[in-house]
Every structure is written in C-alpha cells, then in structure tokens.
Image (tube, grey):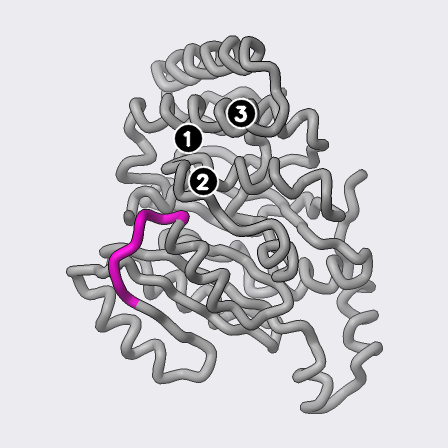
Amino acid sequence: MTMSTSQEDIMNVQLTHGPGSDALSLRPLVTVVTPVFNGERCLQRCIDSVASQTWPNIEHIVVDGGSKDGTPDILERAAAGKRLRYTSGRDAGVYDAMSKGVRMARGDYIHILNADDRYSSPDVLSRVVPHMERNGLDLCHGRARQVAADGQMVCEFGRDVDFKSLLKKMRVAHPTVVVRRWVYEHYGAFSVGFRIAADHEFLLRVWSKVRVGFVPDVQVLMEIGGLSTQNANVQKSYRESMGAAVMHGRNPWAAAVRCGYEIIKHRVIRSRGFQTHDKKTDHRPLLVPVSESVR
C-alpha cells in the first residue's frame, strides 16, 4: 500500500516537538552518506545539495576511496562546516564505502546519496522524514530521475512493490531509499560479494522484515555516465540481481530465464536509444548504480 507524504505530516512533527532550538535538537537526525572516488567534477554539487536541504538536523558523511584528483581539497574545505565529516582511504568498492559510512552514522535515519547524485529539491528530507515518523516506517523509497550531463531527462524509475515483485526484478530506486539506522545494525549493511547488485540484495534481505513505505515523487537526480553506460556492466548487473534473488528464495531456473529476457530487452532498448524505455514496467535502461562511474 502506498503511503504518500503531505504538508500535514511536516506540521505534525513540528507541533509534537514545539518551537525553538530545543525542538530542532529533538527532530530526528538524518545522516546522508556519500561514497566518492575521484569525484572532483560532481562532489561539490552533491555537497551543496545536501547543505540546501531544509530539514534542520542533518549530518553529511563522505567516504572517499583514496581519490587522486581534487576531491581531498573539496572535502577539506567542506569539513570546515559543522555538518560534514569525511574519511579517506582505500576500500573494497562502492558498497564497502557505503557500509563504512553507515557504521560512522549517528543519525536516526540514513540516506545514501552518491557523489554524482543530488536532491531534486531542497525539501526532499523535510517531506520524507515526517512521513516516516508519522507512519512508523523503517524504510521509505520514491522515484529517481536519470539525467544526461546536459540536464536532459533520460528516464524516471522507482515504483511501489511487494517482496514478490522485488524478487523478480530490482524495481526500487535505491538512491531514494531512507532507512532507520537500527535496520542496518540488526540486519547488516551491504555485501562486498556483489560489485553491482548489493543494493538489491540488501533490500531483499530486509524487505519482508521491516515496515516499508513509498512516496511517489522524484526525490533524486542521477547523472548517467562512465561505467554505467557500458553494456557488459549492465549484463553483469542483471546476473548479480538474479543471483541475489536466488539467495532469497527465487527458483534458479525462473531467475535464469528472467535474466536472459532482461538482457535481450536491454539490447533492443539500447539499439533504439535511451529515450525509449518500457513505461508499462517502469523499465530502467541503466541498471548499474551511477556511483560506479566514480569508483
């Protein structure tokens, strides 16, 4: 069942905590985790996007994988403020970096925003967090929009799904997923055994065990590019996703058939150009997380 957010949700949280500085400290802390590697081109835009959020209680944690470009300088300047912390060093890939950020988080809620992603508007967290508080949600997701470097929309994706549907295909826009910290603490974060589909495996692991909600708004803008446009990586993402599904109860033969079908469909869509996508099934032409372009 879809639970949508509203201005009433925001007012209920504000009235519960009352006015003044004490109210701000009582509002749930949101930790935004950003993994990055050689992201000087896009990192500042991501940092500015987080800083522009109207939700008053935010910490921003950036996990740098040992960048060799201007990323460390950007982080050093940004850390002069009170809301951003960062760590830098080699890691085992983007999902290892995400898990490091989760472990560092102090927030009641955690949102993972990749370095080449940004919020669609300044009030995204001010809409999502009150909705989760009001409805007692442990995990909430919405829609994301993929855009080209020139800002042109490629497609939108993300839909309200149940576990059975998620088992068949990754239909959740993971860049929009906000999770209560206790979920990570209890069920674990991301498996480094997956290079591309650890987000899908994590969602399959927790989906039927926590209370999930969906906000049908575009919350995150994702810039496409780099490895995510390479066909071999798209095929690998389908195979990894089906492997994750088998781990969580899907019939292996059904998973193999679905994987082959999705790969063939992607090739057809790719041959027609990225503007052509299956609106009926909310097809996501690029299944590799955009964060792969900066890892």
Which residues fall within the magenta stretch?
A: 88-95
Mark-to-mark CA distance, 3 and 1? 9 Å
Q: Amino acid at mark 1?
A: Leu
Which is nearer the eye, 146 or 295? 295
Give residue 13's quadrant in the image: bottom right
Q: Earlier in the sequence, mark 2 or mark 1?
A: 2
**Left/right of residue 229 with respect to residue 178 in the rendered view:** left
Q: Residue at image x 71%, y 89%?
A: 22
Q: Residue at image x 54%, y 67%?
A: 31
Q: Residue at image x 53%, y 25%?
A: 283
Q: Residue at image x 25%, y 57%?
A: 90
The answer to whether residue 116 is magenta is no
User: Dots 2 and 1: beta carbons under 8 Å?
Assistant: yes
**Left/right of residue 105 with respect to residue 214 in the rendered view:** left
Q: In the rendered image of this protein, does residue 157 appear above or below residue 53?
A: above
The answer to whether residue 94 is magenta is yes
Mark-to-mark CA distance, 2 and 1? 9 Å
Residue under numbered circle 1: 286
**Left/right of residue 108 with respect to residue 76 in the rendered view:** right
Callout 1 secondary element: loop
